[in-house]
């Protein structure tokens, strides 16, 4: 049994009191000679996404026990993204990612555990756990809690995206209040995460591509018996990783991040994937920047027709074999780096070589790299005088790559939503929402309420949106986010005025404010930084520490 840390905490005469504490929670004499595994579940009943993770923790503990270890469960927090959308609570969403990594560091480092399994679900819980994995460098495995089942309205498959967009459709008179109500009732029928390839499911698939979770474990729904089987298998796997000496930084290398970026682009996954992979790379001490994303994005087409880029939900992908079916296509097309090690103790190429798809046709859900769903990648990195440090555009979920229009500027999301709801936004407008960046908001809230209202109003292809905030994975339309530097630190987005011409070119990777340099210089002289929105509490602490979006919006001053 590998006992890297537990000896120091629980062996010897002077540690007798520590043993007393664990005897009080059920340990016997033999347990002290076993590897001690923490099962950290991001758990909360305040939403469906992580509602069941304590239940899954029991299965992980069983797996640890079968493999000869002893396991104890502990929770970490969850901020439910969807419930907070469009509210002041959304500021805590991204903040919770770093908070989760910090609480896991405190919990794992202070109880002498030898290894751990992290169970995530809602959007930020997953990168938070993976950041803690590479920060702590103890043998560890990531387990996803699973997606919710999709809902049905007749033969129309529903996800929560339908409810968000139905609000815009109702406000613009396209559907009745009764129809909105039906969609609200039917779109989320079980616990688990939002059902499309939004941020949670994106991160679950990326975890497989990174090699930090078991191959095939991303897509079984939260309610599935296979998910419980993966939980037990993750418990067994963490002890095997400990025996083999596989620690997270041996897994999360440049090649693994490369594979994750390829997968993100090939699936048209959430733009949050970029932010989180940057943060994971930072914590792992790997130099993987927006330039790497930019280069990779130019050679990967979209091969998955998953919502919001296509019509299918996560459970449809699960039916045809899950993430390995995507990864195997990318591997066969030589787009992956096959030597990247996984927590299973083997390189990803070897695992994929052995993996065989079920005999279910993939028709319409997945495409070949040679004959892709869309010929360009799901996300592009944009640069230009409006975003000198970069911005991201989700081109996979937009039917328009190039857009020119006149700016409609709003200092905050609430103001912008009011304008959309009042019908003030017209074709050809570029809605600019600023002071919503990592430091300015603070916490880079997601703009799903506004973007869904624009799409719901039928303006998804004739109105663009630019922000220093973020987007939900469910966002579609002509949307550019993560503009860096942000307005609150004097980024050029702070200088935009109503009526300015803005050029967005997803193909060329350009975001341009068509205003002469001298005029921008004049505006800069008149600009003064706004006072911080919060003077105390977590939001103030975060605003003081956070870095810009192109650095993953991390708060850790330096990797451990
Ligand atoms: Fe948790 Fe969507 S709100 S995954």
Image (cartoon, grey):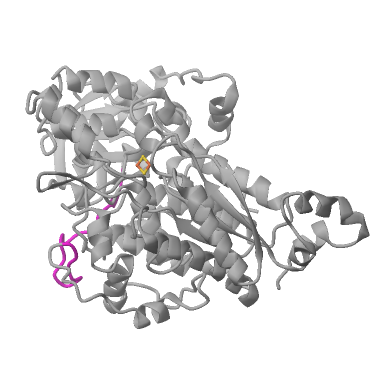
Q: Is residue 461 visible?
A: yes
Q: Residue at x 19, y 38 (%)?
A: 162
| Camera-nearest residue between 374 and 103 | 103
| Camera-nearest residue between 481 and 272 | 272
Locate ligand 1 by image quadrant: top left
- From what the image shows, is residue 461 above or below residue 515? below
Q: Which residues are magenta?
A: 365-383
| Camera-nearest residue between 199 and 444 | 199
- On the image, the x and y values in percent for residue 471 come to 32, 39
Q: Is residue 130 visible?
A: no
Q: Residue at x 48, y 39 (%)?
A: 44
- On the image, the x and y values in percent for residue 189 come to 27, 42
Residue 114 shown in magenta? no
Q: Is residue 38 left or right of residue 13?
A: left
Quarter of the figure with the N terminus: bottom right
Residue 373 shown in magenta? yes
Q: Is residue 333 left or right of residue 442?
A: left
Q: Quadrant of residue 112?
A: bottom right
- On the image, the x and y values in percent for residue 352 come to 36, 77
Count up the numbered dots. Answer: 0
Task: Name the main secondary structure of what is drawn in magenta.
Answer: loop
- From what the image shows, is residue 330 above or below residue 539? below
């Amino acid at each position: 049994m590998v006992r890297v840390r537990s000896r120091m905490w629980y062996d010897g005469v002077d540690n007798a009191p520590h043993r007393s504490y664990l005897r009080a929670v059920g340990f016997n004499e033999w347990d002290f000679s076993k590897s001690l595994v923490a099962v950290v579940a991001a758990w909360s009943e305040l939403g469906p996404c992580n509602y069941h993770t304590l239940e899954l923790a029991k299965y992980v503990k069983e797996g640890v026990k079968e493999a000869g270890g002893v396991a104890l469960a502990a929770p970490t927090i969850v901020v439910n993204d969807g419930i907070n959308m469009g509210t002041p609570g959304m500021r805590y969403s991204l903040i919770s990612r770093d908070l989760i990594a910090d609480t896991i560091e405190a919990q794992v480092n202070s109880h002498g555990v030898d290894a751990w399994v992290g169970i995530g679900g809602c959007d930020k819980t997953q990168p938070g756990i993976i950041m803690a994995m590479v920060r702590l460098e103890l043998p560890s495995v990531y387990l996803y809690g699973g997606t919710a089942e999709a809902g049905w309205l007749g033969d129309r498959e529903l996800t929560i995206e339908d409810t968000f967009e139905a609000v815009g459709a109702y406000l613009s008179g396209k559907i009745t209040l009764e129809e909105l109500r039906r969609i609200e009732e039917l779109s989320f029928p079980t616990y688990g995460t939002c059902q499309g390839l939004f941020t949670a499911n994106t991160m679950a698939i990326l975890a497989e591509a990174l090699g930090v979770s078991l191959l095939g474990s991303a897509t079984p729904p939260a309610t599935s018996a296979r998910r419980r089987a993966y939980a037990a298998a993750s418990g067994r796997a963490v002890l095997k990783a400990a025996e083999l000496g596989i620690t997270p930084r041996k897994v999360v290398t440049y090649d693994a991040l490369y594979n994750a970026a390829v997968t993100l682009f090939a699936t048209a996954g959430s733009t949050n994937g970029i932010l989180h992979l940057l943060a994971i790379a930072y914590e792992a001490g790997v130099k993987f920047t927006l330039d790497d994303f930019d280069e990779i994005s130019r050679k990967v087409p979209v091969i998955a027709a998953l919502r919001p880029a296509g019509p299918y939900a996560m459970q449809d992908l699960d039916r045809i074999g899950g993430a390995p079916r995507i990864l195997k296509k990318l591997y066969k097309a030589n787009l992956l780096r096959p030597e990247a090690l996984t927590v299973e103790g083997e390189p990803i190429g070897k695992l994929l070589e052995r993996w065989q798809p079920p005999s279910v046709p993939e028709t319409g859900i997945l495409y070949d790299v040679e004959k892709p769903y869309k010929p360009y990648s799901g996300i592009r990195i944009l640069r230009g005088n409006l975003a000198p440090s970069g911005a991201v555009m989700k081109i996979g979920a937009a039917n328009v790559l190039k857009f020119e229009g006149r700016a409609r500027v709003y200092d905050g999301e609430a103001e912008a939503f009011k304008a959309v709801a009042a019908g003030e936004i017209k074709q050809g407008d570029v809605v600019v929402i600023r002071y919503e960046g990592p430091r300015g908001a603070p916490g880079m809230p997601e703009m799903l309420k506004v973007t869904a209202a624009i799409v719901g109003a039928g303006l998804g292809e004739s109105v663009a949106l630019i922000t220093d905030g973020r987007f939900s994975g469910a966002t579609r339309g002509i949307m550019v986010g993560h503009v860096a530097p942000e307005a609150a630190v004097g980024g050029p987005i702070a200088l935009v005025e109503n009526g300015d011409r803005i050029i967005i070119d997803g193909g060329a990777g350009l975001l341009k404010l068509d205003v002469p340099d001298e005029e921008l210089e004049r505006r800069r002289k008149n600009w003064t930084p706004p006072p911080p929105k919060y003077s105390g509490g977590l939001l103030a602490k975060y605003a003081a520490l956070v870095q810009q979006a192109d650095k993953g919006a991390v708060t850790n001053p330096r990797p451990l």
